[in-house]
Image (tube, rainbow, N blue to C red):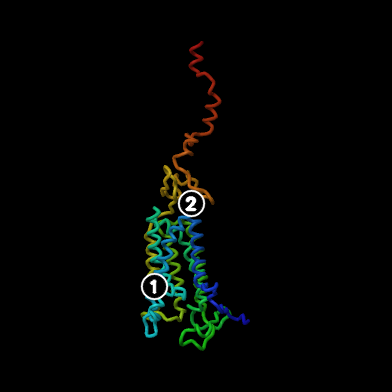
Amino acid sequence: MDLAYIPSPSESVWHLGPIPIRAYALCLIAGIVAACWIAEARMRSRGAPKWAVLDIAVWAVPFGIVGGRLYHVFTSPDAYFGADGDPWKILAVWEGGLGIPGAILLGGVGVWFACRQLGLKFSMTADAIAPGLPVAQAIGRLGNWFNQELYGKPLDAWWAVSIDREHRVFGYLEYSTFHPTFLYELLWNLGVALVVWAADRKVKFGAGRALALYVALYGIGRFWIEGLRIDPAEAFAGLRLNQWMSVIVVVLAVIYLIRARGTRQVFVLDGGERVLVDWNSAEAKAAGYVNGGLPKGAEPGEIGGAATEADPEPDRPEDDVIADETHADEPPADADKTES
């Protein structure tokens, strides 16, 4: 095997009897599972109910898939409505073609609906799930590798990807190796996830600002990666539509980051009900939070409950307590004088 380039998988579909197992679908599922796992850990550290993220995913995933597909069809209409297009292929999601901006937009709507149902604050939830989203995207991009799609301009380098002739874009049939733009985006997204996680850990984002940082960083990467791609897409003024969309979302995200105010909020129990408080508040510390998060496996404590009853005077100096115990049996000075 010639290892001077990245080979493409020879197969993207396997059959389990009559059931087709598609690599693209497996990559999407793996990405969703990874995002849910990350989001669950972050939600639990903020005191959210166990497995609330699964209830959120029930809404967010279908909305995200529909939004991603609609955006893809909107930005690449010729494959479906052109001279040789087939509108029925809009339903063939397994063949690839999910636009990330549309998936984020409608997926966010799904998260909002779920938060309404669960009694969760949308902005807090958005900040918690933000680092998991680019991880899901990174894993999902492997599906493009299996489908031999969304590659870039011809490239003669050791990191170029080999594309079989039947998967090459018209006009580039004589070339065999191309920019692996799906790989570029995979690596970029992993970097975005790391930056968002580290920044949130340091700054303790609130009001959806972690999500805004993710959107801004993703848009920057998508702009330059999109400029390398050669798959058919709508263009305007020398830029592909996805590049214009990247410019818009980056500008809006940066404006939001500058103007939005708010710090991380966490759940504490008050009378058995979960209520939100700032991560550095006295209530959060009393409920067991350390540096804005609960220890692994811990549940938020009850504020004003058992902890307060066990120590009715928590601010009383220890020396005063010892002194009181030492002199508890001594008669008052005035009593001695009275007897004498």
Foreground residue among 305 and 257: 305
Q: Residue at x 41, y 77 (%)?
A: 89
Figure quadrant of the N terminus: bottom right
Q: What's the distance in space between the residues labelled 1 and 2, CA to CA?
A: 37 Å
Q: Residue furthest top?
A: 340
Q: Residue at x 49, y 36 (%)?
A: 314
Q: Secondary structure at mark 1?
A: helix
Foreground residue among 12 and 121: 12
Q: Is any atom of residue 191 visible in this view?
A: no
Neighbourhood count class around disc 1 (C-alpha, 10 Å): few under 14, some 14–19, many 20 upward: many
Relative height, residue 262 to residue 83 (above, below): above
Image position of 302 (left or right of 4): left
Q: Closer to the observer: label 1 or label 2?
A: 1
Q: Secondary structure at mark 2?
A: loop
Mark 1 vs mark 2: which is more N-terminal? 1
Q: Is any atom of residue 211 visible in this view?
A: yes
Q: Badge 2 is on which residue?
A: 292
Q: How many marks?
A: 2
Residue 86 lies in quadrant: bottom left
Q: Residue furthest front?
A: 18
Q: Position of residue 138 (x, y in %)?
A: 50, 69
Question: Which three-letter amino acid code belongs to the residue tagged 2?
Answer: Gly
Label 2 near label 1: C-beta < 8 Å?
Answer: no
Q: Badge 1 is on which residue?
A: 71
Q: Position of residue 176 (x, y in %)?
A: 54, 85
Relative height, residue 172 to residue 245 (above, below): below
Q: Residue furthest bottom?
A: 174
Question: Which three-letter amino acid code belongs to the residue tagged 1?
Answer: Tyr
Q: Position of residue 259 (x, y in %)?
A: 37, 60
Foreground residue among 34 and 226: 34
